[in-house]
Image (cartoon, rainbow, N blue to C red):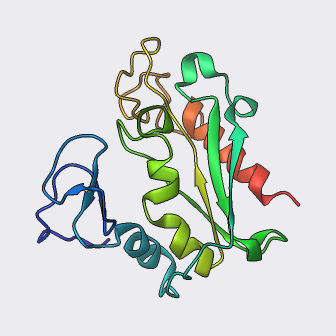
Amino acid sequence: IIYVNDVQAGHGMVTNRQGDNDCGASYRPFFNNCGIPLARNILAAIYGPMRPPPPQLHGRLLRFDQRAYAPLTGSGLSAAGYVFVPRRCVRGGCRVHVAFHGCWQGAQTVGDHFYRRAGYNETADANRIIVLYPQVGASNAPFNPAGCWDYWGYTNPEYHTRRGMQLSAVRAMLARLAER
């Protein structure tokens, strides 16, 4: 675990991307330019030293149908999810990282901001990491107006276990990515 408490960031995904909110902001789209490549730092903390991002991406960002993994009714999942696949990973042999968006950060709310501009793809492209971006959307039934991943039981009482609707769906997505 790495604990950083010296960044005056508001509530949001910290980035080093021009055009994102000021560092101390706590409003939509909840991406705050604090001059820190947080996505890169997260990947380095988990997987070890990272090669620098390439000048341009060589991988592909793909949209896929999440309905194959869980029913939309009751699961909170959006119809579409996204995955970034570096060109060097097309034939396999790469790690997979799951990037869960925050509340108010799903594609339904912020478009492609999280899965295209949070900073994961650049580092993943240079380091043979596939990034899975499953998506949850805002809904009234189940009651989830901010489009949050289930952390309080709105999908079912087993939301936090392998039998939880969302976690089961993500596990199935990972299993699909592992297939040849």
Where residue 1 sits: x, y (%)? 32, 71
In the foreground, 57 or 45: 57
Quarter assignment of residue 63? top right
- Is 48 placed above or below 62 here? below
Considering the image in quadrants, where does the C terminus appear?
Answer: bottom right
Residue drawn at (37%, 44%), measured in percent from left and top?
Answer: 102
Extreme front residue here? 19
Where residue 6 sits: x, y (%)? 11, 71
- Is 49 placed above or below 72 here? below
Extreme right residue here? 180
Residue drawn at (60%, 16%), measured in percent from left and top?
Answer: 73
- Is 140 placed above or below 44 here? above
Quarter assignment of residue 7? bottom left
69 left or right, relative to 15: right
Where residue 10 sits: x, y (%)? 16, 53
In the foreground, 45 or 115: 115
88 left or right, relative to 117: right
Residue drawn at (71%, 34%), measured in percent from left and top?
Answer: 69
**How many tags in the picture?**
0
In the foreground, 147 or 95: 147
Quarter assignment of residue 132? bottom right
- Is 124 placed above or below 136 here? below
Residue drawn at (57%, 72%), measured in percent from left and top?
Answer: 124
Where residue 41 sits: x, y (%)? 38, 75
In the foreground, 73 or 54: 54
